[in-house]
Image (cartoon, helix red, strand yellow):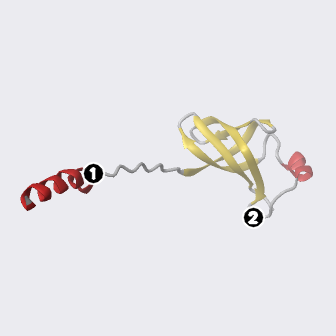
């Protein structure tokens, strides 16, 4: 009788003891590009002339504009500093043609 109860208990507990736990990990890579602005549409996209040729970047929901030293630029200053011909660096998330810019760094202080 004890063996029968023990066997039944093990049969009920066994699936939980050997259950597999699955885990999904998502990696987000932030990368940087740099070049001279050739086209700029505020809030939408920026095209940079890079050493490998022109590259288009789309803007994310929030984009921070900063100077090389890290000073955040307000919207009035952005309107005067971000224009065609200005060298910048952009921080973006994503790969290939699906990249979203979250920070634009003006190469001047």
Q: Read off the residue under disc 1.
A: 19
Give the x, y percent position of residue 105: 73, 54
Mark 1 or mark 2: name the one nearer the start of the chain.
Answer: 1
- In the rendered structure, the answer to whether residue 94 lies left or right of residue 20 reads right
Q: How many labels does the image show?
A: 2
Give 21 or 60, whichever is nearer the viewer: 21
User: Element at badge 1?
Assistant: loop
The image quadrant that residue 3 belongs to is bottom left
Q: Read off the residue under disc 2.
A: 70
**Residue 2 vertical placement versus 16 (above, below):** below
Identify the residue at image location x=60%, y=39%. 99
Q: How crowded is mark 2: few (under 14 residues within 10 Å), some or many (20 or more)?
A: few
Instruction: Report the quarter where the N terminus lies.
Output: bottom left
**Residue 41 vertical placement versus 36 (above, below):** above
Instruction: Report the quarter where the C terminus lies.
Output: bottom right
Give the x, y percent position of residue 77: 89, 53
Give 95 or 4, whichever is nearer the viewer: 4
Give 14 or 34, whichever is nearer the viewer: 14
Give the x, y percent position of residue 70: 75, 64
């Amino acid at each position: 009788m004890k063996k029968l109860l023990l066997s039944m208990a093990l049969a009920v507990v066994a699936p939980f003891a050997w259950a597999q736990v699955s885990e999904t990990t998502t990696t987000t890579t932030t990368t940087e590009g740099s070049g001279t602005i050739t086209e700029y549409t505020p809030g939408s996209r920026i095209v940079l002339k890079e050493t490998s040729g022109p590259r288009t970047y789309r803007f994310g929901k929030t984009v921070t504009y900063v100077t090389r030293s890290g000073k955040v630029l307000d919207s009035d200053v952005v309107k005067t500093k971000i224009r065609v011909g200005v060298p910048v660096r952009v921080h973006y998330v994503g790969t290939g043609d699906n990249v979203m810019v979250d920070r634009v760094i003006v190469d001047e202080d």
